[in-house]
Image: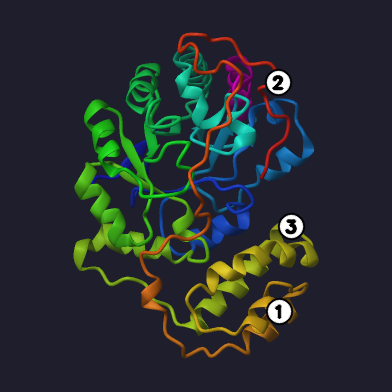
């Protein structure tokens, strides 16, 4: 594949780490970058919190010195606030790339008219994207969007939204091929990604059900996309980015990365150490690492007592002592390949503002739509 171009930056391999709240902090991004190339997006930042300079939010915008292409995702519902936030990113040199979130299906977001609910209001959506692109262009920042197919199967928006974004001047469009109603259930609709690719001239990125490097190759072959976005597939598996780089470099004959339990233990230790360094506090870093333990050990024959102990660590020494009790020779559980990771939930009715579906051309900002803090 030809490199994915975001402005003047060539993304090769054409792989993007999706922002995930509480996951894609500076420590996790560094761990993933040590495995392979791509674009690694920080946690989602709310526009209101950024322009009001909320300390917690400003702290979340942390990039390592060796992050050569700093990528930031913004969430907002108000066009003027979004424009101000993007301009602030440029003026303060906070990032090299801005992505706008129109894909989040979480109720606290959609009930405000944000995330995956917003493209239904096409005029409001268009205002947000146009004003954001204008602010980004002032500072030479490529601006992209990430969205879902729509609210549900009866309220699909992805093709029209893609065309609106393209006309506004975005550098690329990413599609998570599920509706908001699906959340993270069922299978991603790769045919929808192919439809969007056929409709647009700007680069299109596909997101959904990429668990292995081979899945990325299948998605490209099936849809013709210019690159892939990876979210849940890398949870407890940062080496997926080495897998993806090998797949895009070598093609279908590549050899997947299958680390032994001993090799996984070394990566777990490295991850915890990076979190401690990033948070500048050993106890907090170890506490943040606990949620990753089950993902790392998925499929491995590790006893319940040891799993529970690992998920309760409070120091790096304690972690390394417990990791030392694992059998390093145990091979990777191949039966877990291609299986969903992270959130796997049932479809659910989408929470929306009152009267949200009544008009597609109402471009007023819902009262109380802007969230004042960032994070999960």
Q: Nearer the viewer, mark 2 or mark 3?
A: 2
Q: Mark 2 vs mark 3: which is more N-terminal?
A: 3
Q: Is residue 278 above or below residue 42?
A: below
Residue 102: x, y in percent?
A: 49, 31
- In reply to whether residue 88 is colored magenta, the answer given is yes
- Residue 309's tag is 1
Crowd around label 1: few <14 · some 14–19 · many ≥20 (10 Å): some
Q: Secondary structure at mark 3?
A: helix
Q: What distance separates the C-alpha of mark 2 from that of mark 1?
A: 43 Å
- Label 1 vs label 3: CA separation? 22 Å
Find residue 279 and name its label.
3
Question: What span is colored magenta in the figure?
Answer: 77-91
Q: Quadrant of residue 81?
A: top right
Q: Secondary structure at mark 1?
A: helix
Sequence-wise first label, 2 or 1? 1
In this view, the mark in front (1 or 3): 1
Q: Is residue 195 left or right of residue 143?
A: left
Q: Considering depth in this image, is 112 or 182 the residue closer to the camera?
A: 182
Q: Position of residue 259 (x, y in %)?
A: 43, 78
| CA distance separating discs 2 and 3 | 32 Å
């Amino acid at each position: 594949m030809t490199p994915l171009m975001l402005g003047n930056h060539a993304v090769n391999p054409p792989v993007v780490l999706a922002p995930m709240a509480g996951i894609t902090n500076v420590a996790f991004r560094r761990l993933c970058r040590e495995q392979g190339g791509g674009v690694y997006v920080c946690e989602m930042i709310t526009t209101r919190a950024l322009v009001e300079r909320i300390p917690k939010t400003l702290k979340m915008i942390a990039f390592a010195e060796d992050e050569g292409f700093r990528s930031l995702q913004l969430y907002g519902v108000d066009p003027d606030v979004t424009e101000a936030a993007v301009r602030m990113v440029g003026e303060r040199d906070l990032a090299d790339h801005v992505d706008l979130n129109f894909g989040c299906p979480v109720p606290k977001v959609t009930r405000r008219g944000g995330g995956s609910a917003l493209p239904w209001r096409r005029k409001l959506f268009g205002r947000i994207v146009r004003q954001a692109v204008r602010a980004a262009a002032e500072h030479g920042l490529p601006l992209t969007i990430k969205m879902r197919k729509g609210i549900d199967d009866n309220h699909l928006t992805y093709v029209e939204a893609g065309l609106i974004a393209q006309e506004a001047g975005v550098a690329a469009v990413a599609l998570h091929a599920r509706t908001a109603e699906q959340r993270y259930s069922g299978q991603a609709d790769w045919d929808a990604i192919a439809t969007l690719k056929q409709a647009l001239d700007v680069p299109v990125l596909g997101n959904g059900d990429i668990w292995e490097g081979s899945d990325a190759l299948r998605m490209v072959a099936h849809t013709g996309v210019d690159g892939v976005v990876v979210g849940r597939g890398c949870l407890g598996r940062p080496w997926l980015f080495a897998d993806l780089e090998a797949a895009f470099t070598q093609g279908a004959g590549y050899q997947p990365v299958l680390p032994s339990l001993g090799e996984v233990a070394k990566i777990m230790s490295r991850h915890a150490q990076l979190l401690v360094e990033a948070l500048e506090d050993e106890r907090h870093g170890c506490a943040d690492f606990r949620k990753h333990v089950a993902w790392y050990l998925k499929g491995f024959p590790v006893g319940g007592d040891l799993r529970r102990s690992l998920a309760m660590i409070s120091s790096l020494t304690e972690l390394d002592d417990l990791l030392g009790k694992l059998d390093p020779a145990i091979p990777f559980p191949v039966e877990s390949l291609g299986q969903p990771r992270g959130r796997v939930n049932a479809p659910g009715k989408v929470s929306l503002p009152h009267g949200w579906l009544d008009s597609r051309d109402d471009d007023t900002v819902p009262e109380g739509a802007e969230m004042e803090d960032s994070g999960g």
